[in-house]
Amino acid sequence: MLWDDVRENYGFRYLLKDRLNQDCLENLFSIIRGKGGHRFNPSPQEFRTALRQTMVDAVLVQSKSQNCRGDIDALLFSLDQVPSLGANTAVDS
């Protein structure tokens, strides 16, 4: 189980169960959809562009009309971890 693994292998003494939810992902996807004119199904390239813009702008600000708990954590990755579109990368139009 998750708790047994993190306790035994990583030395955790407690687990904040309220942080084990998808609200932070829902907030991120809401921001990304908003950057594309609230498209519910952005293409992979549109998603990547909106994600990069979100990371660059550092706008993980809570929407006033959100329907889930606020995300108080920082981004789990940096812009350097998102691959760029190079000349050899095929992109569907």
Image (spheres, rainbow, N blue to C red):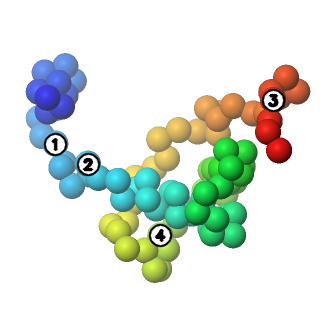
- Per the model, the C-alpha gap separating discs 1 and 3 is 43 Å
| Residue extending furthest toward the top | 9
**Front label number (1 vs 3):** 3
- The reply to whether callout 2 and callout 3 are in contact (CB within 8 Å) is no
Label 3 element class: loop
Where does residue 36 sit, x and y in percent of width and height?
A: 69, 63
**Front label number (4 vs 3):** 3
Q: Earlier in the sequence, mark 1 or mark 2?
A: 1
Q: Quadrant of residue 10?
A: top left
Q: Amino acid at mark 2?
A: Leu
**Front label number (2 vs 4):** 2
**Residue identifier under label 3:** 90
- The reply to whether callout 2 and callout 4 are in contact (CB within 8 Å) is no
Q: Is residue 42 left or right of residue 25?
A: right
**Residue identifier under label 2:** 20
Q: Earlier in the sequence, mark 4 or mark 3?
A: 4
Q: Amino acid at mark 4?
A: Gln
Q: Is residue 72 left or right of residue 91?
A: left
- Per the model, the C-alpha gap separating discs 2 and 4 is 18 Å
The mark found on residue 15 in the picture is: 1
Label 1 element class: loop
